[in-house]
Amino acid sequence: MKRKETSGGRLIRRQLLFHVRRVTSDYALFFAAIGIGLMIIDNEMNAAKIYQRGSYTSLILKALILLSTIILVILVIKFHVHEVQLFMNANSAEDWRIAVTWQRGLQIVLEVMVCALCPLPIDINFYWTASDGDTMKTVELPLNVLLSIPMFFRLYWLCRVMLFTDASSRSIAGLNRVNFNARFILKTLMTLCPGTVLMIFTASLWVIAGWILRLCERHDTVDPINIHSQKHQDYLNSLWLIAITFLSVGYGDIVPNTYCGRAMAVITGILGTCTSSMVVAVIARKLELTRAEKHVHNFMMDTQLTKQLKHTAANVLRETWLIYKHRCLVDKIEPAKIRMHQRKFLVAIYALRKVKRDQRKLAENSVSLGDVAKTTSNTYEMVHDVQNNQEGLSLRMTAMEYQLADINRELSALVEFLRPNRILKNASLTTSGIINSHDNTVRRRCNAVEVEIIAEVIVCNDFVYLVLFFHFLYDANNKLKKKNMPKALKDI
């Protein structure tokens, strides 16, 4: 009873931990989005000269960003605490240090570092190197620009929020040894709606990368004659640069000048190449025939090949008959016609072989994954049945061994009872010669009877028939002895 209560308590606690972890991840995503939104508002208002750096409004916004960052870091630590508690609950561990491996510790440190990056309320500037065609120049850049870009990494909480489904899905995944992680969720989404996922990813990448590129190139305005620097002040121009870089076009009308912008362009090009290959794979999969369409196509091809096989076989027979006719049934043999029909005969043979080869290829290609899975399932069921039959056969063999041991004991007792030693000891000295001669005969017959009994034991499988057979032999042996025993021995 105590064990049942303990397991029930563990299950309830596990469900509670799952609920708390889901709520924690929801709050973490909310504060991550709040921090990113406040950061974008602060940078855009500062670029539009609505307020200056160090003003009261700027300090309030940065203080709010810092507060949301602190709350997010606390939620990250709380989330991993619940992860450790779930591990301890699932594995009945008592010490939390068992669950904290170096991989988990490294993951926690990386997540805390990523979520802790945010603009500071104070202004710190550093010098940034940029290129203007053939010349290099140094630009003074605020540190908050570099601290604002990594804030977009907080969007990984979107994948983490999508992980939490109902208990039945987690149970099915655990029984099938499938890790219910972000990779599994992305594979599922790419299987269900690949076009929608790629479209949302592309649009999000363009919007975020365009804004980051504009943020990097915004402060490169030392030389007002530089056309490219002035073009990056417009967000649409940065979005255009990201789009043509993503699509691997690269017109060259707008180029990045800073190393930050160039790095963003390189990352966009790499992601654009990967996305383009995924689009090609999705289109190829969409153009592939479904299972029902494959069945219809295979049926149509099989019908067409069957007709072709009949026609080619008929052509072979016709040319064979014509060759025979022009060789044996005409008065004047014409070698030219014979050679012509021989060539047609070879062509018909080649066509027949080609049709048969196409039929074999069609039969090989018609085996789909569903058929393979069905064959595998049937094989597994057959192996399972064989194992069950083998277990039943082993049990029956064990029972048969016990029955044979009992039969052996009964045989030993029966043989001892059949031996006529007691009768021979009571015989008189006057009839000892007669008794000895008949005793040898009886012994030989008894030995023969024993051999027959043992042979019948090996052959017979049913114990009841075996006992009846022993009884019959015993009666026959007694009658035989009484019939052949001398008169003097009967009197004794």
Image: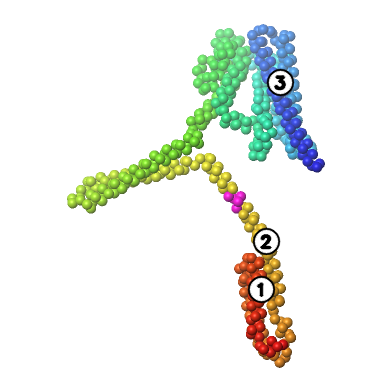
Assign the C terminus to one quadrant of the image.
bottom right
Q: Is residue 75 visible?
A: yes
Q: Earlier in the sequence, mark 3 or mark 2?
A: 3
Q: Position of residue 244 (x, y in %)?
A: 52, 19
Distance between mark 3 and mark 1 Cα atoms? 96 Å
Q: Position of residue 67 (x, y in %)?
A: 74, 18
Residue under pointer 3: 31
Residue under pointer 1: 471
Distance between mark 2 and mark 1 Cα atoms? 24 Å
Q: Position of residue 118 (x, y in %)?
A: 70, 19
Task: Please indicate whether residue 263 sits to the left or right of residue 1 in the image.
Answer: left
Residue 297 occupies quadrant:
top left
Magenta residues, dominant SS class: helix
In this view, the residue farthest toward the right is 2
Residue 131 occupies quadrant:
top right
Name the foreground residue: 369 vs 123. 369
